[in-house]
Structure formats: structure tokens, C-alpha cells
Amino acid sequence: RICSCSTRFVVPDERMSLPPGLTQVDPAIAQQLAAGGGGPNGMPTQQDVAQAQQKQVEQEQMRADLLVRILSPEAKERLSRIALVKPDKAKRLEEMVIGMARSGRLQGKLDDGQLKRFLEQIEAGGGGGGGGGGGVQFDRRRAVDSDEEEIDLSDL
């Protein structure tokens, strides 16, 4: 399905099945398909969508393989636990580690302590990714019937 606005986005149809492990189509790939689809009216064909999904799955697999080679088992486990709670932070951490590995700044496998330091850098630089600073904040409000705010009903 394509929206009728000037910018077209590909919305996965219920009939289209995504490969295992793929939850959604990458927006950049969806936009490429919408812009240059080979079907009628410039719409992407099923084959275009399938190729884009296959490419995305291959990219994710390459990324996972690279992380297995870069990270120690403990660091990989920590990263997977972070991904369960804060997927955006885990993605930034993955990108940071992969970028350092590709530029040759990592020597050997990254252990859990080094991963923690990188995580602290991300928290210091980019914040918690939603809340104010990553911590839990409680906003306690007093009930209306508290002793401090008694309402005088004697004049009624």
C-alpha cells in the first residue's frame, strides 16, 4: 500500500511475509523502492520488495557476524541485554564498536569492561535516549485531601 501524498512510503502489506528476524523494512530501502519501483505507476513490485528485504537481512547478518568477531562472549551478552531494554542505545553502541573496528582502533576482542566504558561515553555524550538523563524520576504529588491544603467547608 502506498499513501497518496507527494512522498510515497512503502507500508508492508499483511500478505507480504517478512523473513525470520526481520520486523520491518528499513525506511531508506522503502523510500528507494517507492522512488524507483519497476511496477506500474512507479510502484515497487513484489520482486523489488523481496530483493530489498533480502539485502537488509544480509546486512544485518554481516553486522551480527562482525560483532561476534569483535566482542568477547561476555561483552556480546551485555550488548544483547542492553538491546532488550534500550534498543536505540544498543544500536549506537554497535555502530561505535563497528566503526572503531573498521578504522583499526580495536586490538583483539573487546571485553566487557571496555564495552562498559564505551557505554558510559554514549550515556555522557548522547543522554539516555528519551528520558532526562536515563534515570528514573518520580513525580510525587500530594492528594487534594492533604493536611496542607484543607478546604474550609464551614461557610457552605
Image (cartoon, rainbow, N blue to C red):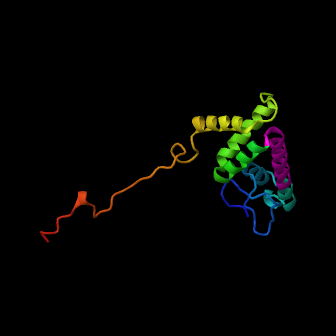
Quadrant in the rendering for residue 25: bottom right
Q: Residue furthest left?
A: 155
Q: Residue at x 75, y 66 (%)?
A: 13
Q: Position of residue 73 (x, y in %)?
A: 79, 44
User: Could you say where residue 118 lies in the image, as x and y percent from the top left?
Assistant: 67, 35
Q: In percent of the image, x 79 and y 33: which residue is there? A: 101
Q: Please tell me which residue lies in front, 30 or 40.
A: 30
Q: Is residue 57 magenta?
A: yes
Nearest the viewer among 43 and 112 is: 112
Q: Is residue 4 left or right of residue 140?
A: right
Q: Which quarter shows the N terminus? A: bottom right
Q: Position of residue 135 (x, y in %)?
A: 52, 46
Would you say residue 59 sits in the magenta stretch?
yes
Pick the front one: 5 or 62: 62
Please tell me how many numbered marks the rendered image carries.
0
Residue at 57% in and 40% down:
127
Left or right, 120 with reference to 59: left
Give x and y (percent) for residue 15. Answer: 79, 69
- Of the 4 image quadrants, the one containing the C terminus is bottom left
Main SS, magenta region, reads helix
Is residue 15 placed above or below 68 in the rendered structure?
Answer: below
Which residues are the magenta region? 52-72
Instruction: Please identify the quarter of the rendering in which residue 2 is found.
Output: bottom right
